Image (cartoon, grey):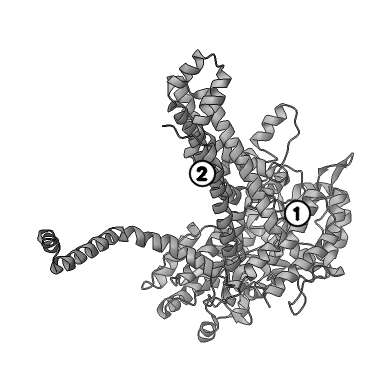
Amino acid sequence: MANVNKAKAASPGTAASVRRWGSYATLEKWKDFLFALPALAFLGVFLYYPLVNTIYISFTDWNMVRPDKELVGFKNYNWLFTNEDFYQSLQVTFLYTIMDVVLTLGFGLLLALLFNVSSKVYAFMRGVIFMPYYISMVIASMVFLWIYNGSYGFLNAVVGYFGIAPHDWLINPATVLPALVGVSLWKGVGFAMILFISGIRSIPVEYYEAAAIDGASRFHSFRYITLPLLSPMTLFLLITTFIASMQVFQSIHVMTNGGPLGASNAIVYWIYNMAFEQFRIGRASALIMIFFVIILVLTLLQWIVSRKKVHYEG
Amino acid sequence: MEGLNYMVEEFHKKYPHITVEPVYQGAYNDLHQKLQAAVAARDVPAVTNVEVSSLPNFADSGVFADLTPWIQRDQTNLADFSQGMLDAYSYNGKQFGFPLIVSTSVFVYNKTLLDELGVQPPQTWDEIEAFNKAVAIIENGETKRYAFSVPGWDAWYFDPWLINGGGQILTDDMSASAIETPESLRYAENFYKWISDGYMHMGYGTGASSNMRQNFLDGNIAMVQHTSAMIKTYRENASFEIGVSFVPGDVSRISNIGGAGIVMMEGAPDAEKEAAWKFIEHMTSAEHNIKWAEAVGYLPTRKSAIESEEGKQYFERWPQYEAVFAHFDDVTPRLKHIAYPEFRAHYIEVMGEMALNGQDPVPLLKEAANKINEVLKDYE
């Protein structure tokens, strides 16, 4: 503190004051750094160090329990890029993500339009739709395991009522992904709805009034006012849902274990399986790095493409 | 875990200066994952469970302590253990652990039904055709009652079939796949035929185990191959009498060991290792063997325990286990290869193709053999 006062008191232009100014600035610089240090240390230990270490492990044949790690170059990456399971796993992940994102956003918006009414009854109904969001994925998966069961499941009882034959939803490779999307949709659609409603409510009423005077229909108001002005919210939901869907794991772990016949072997589940069941930490780390790059590139792409399409109010 | 608490209490009475803190770790996958993390963090428990087919992987990496010095020092009577069960916990000639919670796959059958029909469960492959015809009910090409079911979701259930047919999973020197040899394919050819004819049921995928169990309890399947650890559950839930039969044999008649063993961690301090050895001795002692087995629903492991008065009473309460112990030394280890947990996925998938899509397993097993060889090449 004394130093700082002296520096302020010294008149500019003298040699002594220049030196003092220097030490003052240095101190200021270090002070900023010191304030950031706890956060940096945290990020360093829990984010950057693991990231760098994962890159390193991806070039080794480590099995996590052996003390030595042997460097094997690009062997793990080569194995992945020449393995058909890798492409199947990517396909599964993308199929799941596309279905999940389209349905969650589509139904989220539809429900937002339907339930955007200020009354206690509607507030209650919004609450009911949002409720599954609070339930842990593991519990939701356990419940759906029973719902989808081929012999005594609830879903078969419902479709049986309409004369449809019972079906093993999680054991048939054709229905296992839609079944998994169903769980995610049930859990996540309420959240999308609430965000869309808050987006719709932030659109100034004047626009709708002006459009009504000009004779715009309800569809036109939706198409030319609601949808464009909702675009920042849509972009936010698109990116967050996209990333979450790409990383689907818990429901697969509980409900299908990647099966049947690899039909639900999404990337993150495969990483887990490789690392902890096959003891292939090196290969799993290589897949982590590839997957990291894929998500990064696709997220950037969404952001760049949508920059032109997203309208920010004000 | 009442059984475990009892065992720990008994141990504390015997060794008041050693403290044992049991920490529940979840299913085998979770346990292995945590063990891996503990080793990487160099902060290991002194003693742990390990699922039998993962032992080679951990042992090969030097994670588990070789128990031979302790066995020699205290002159542990190894001959008293079931030889197959004991051998399952050795690797490269070293004893890394002892059988703790042991199971094997057996045929659980609807005794009431078979008695009515006047049939016995098949003891050899030759008897299976006749058994199928006597037991299964097929109307207009649709099976109303299956003769028997073999799980397709885990190699643990069909590896014994492969071996009993005269086959091998790997060649003698373990350098290449042997699942595609004519002897190794015999079981798959039979399965395919029995499934196509509508006699045999094979479960695969999510919930397959509970579906199979439910179908058996509902009378839709007369006999199911399942883990001996489920015998208790079957007996408690069936509305009919339950019988147990050892898996039928042909060239040989074995069943593989399942469950978990008790091992010591190499990374633990010496004092803890000494305590761990005392605990391992206690947990696998003949004295507590029957009580422990009955409490957890797994199998006794020691000959003296089975032959004791307590053992006789145990068989009176649980006559179903007699079929297992008539084959005490035919419960053999699974394939001991560090790549086994990885490459077995390739031929398990073939069972899935057969069970779900009705595919002929023979060409697929030949393809799977190539994939297995690729995996093996990586471990050379």
Mark 2 closeness class: few <14, some 14–19, many ≥20 residues within 10 Å? few
Mark 1 closeness class: few <14, some 14–19, many ≥20 residues within 10 Å? many
Out of B379 and B13, give the one closest to the viewer: B379
Out of A228 and B360, give the one closest to the viewer: A228
Q: Residue at x 80, y 53 (%)?
A: B354
Q: Residue at x 67, y 30 (%)?
A: A158
Out of B113 and A115, give the one closest to the viewer: A115
Q: Is mark 1 on a helix, strand or loop?
A: helix
Residue A146 coordinates in the image, percent (x, y): 62, 40
Residue A72 coordinates in the image, percent (x, y): 61, 75
Kind of residue at disc 2 = Thr
Q: Is residue A218 visible?
A: yes
Residue A265 coordinates in the image, percent (x, y): 65, 53
Q: Do the residues indicated by labels 1 and 2 lie within the same chain of the protein?
A: no
**Protein chain holding label 2:** A
Q: Quadrant of residue B121?
A: bottom right
The answer for how far apart the CA atoms under marks 1 and 2 are is 36 Å
Disc number placed over residue A240 in the picture, else none? 2
Q: Residue at x 68, y 62 (%)?
A: A81
Q: Is mark 2 on a helix, strand or loop?
A: helix
Quadrant where the C terminus of chain B is found in the figure: bottom right
Q: Can residue B22 be seen in this view?
A: no
Residue A122 coordinates in the image, percent (x, y): 47, 22
Disc number placed over residue B352 in the picture, else none? 1
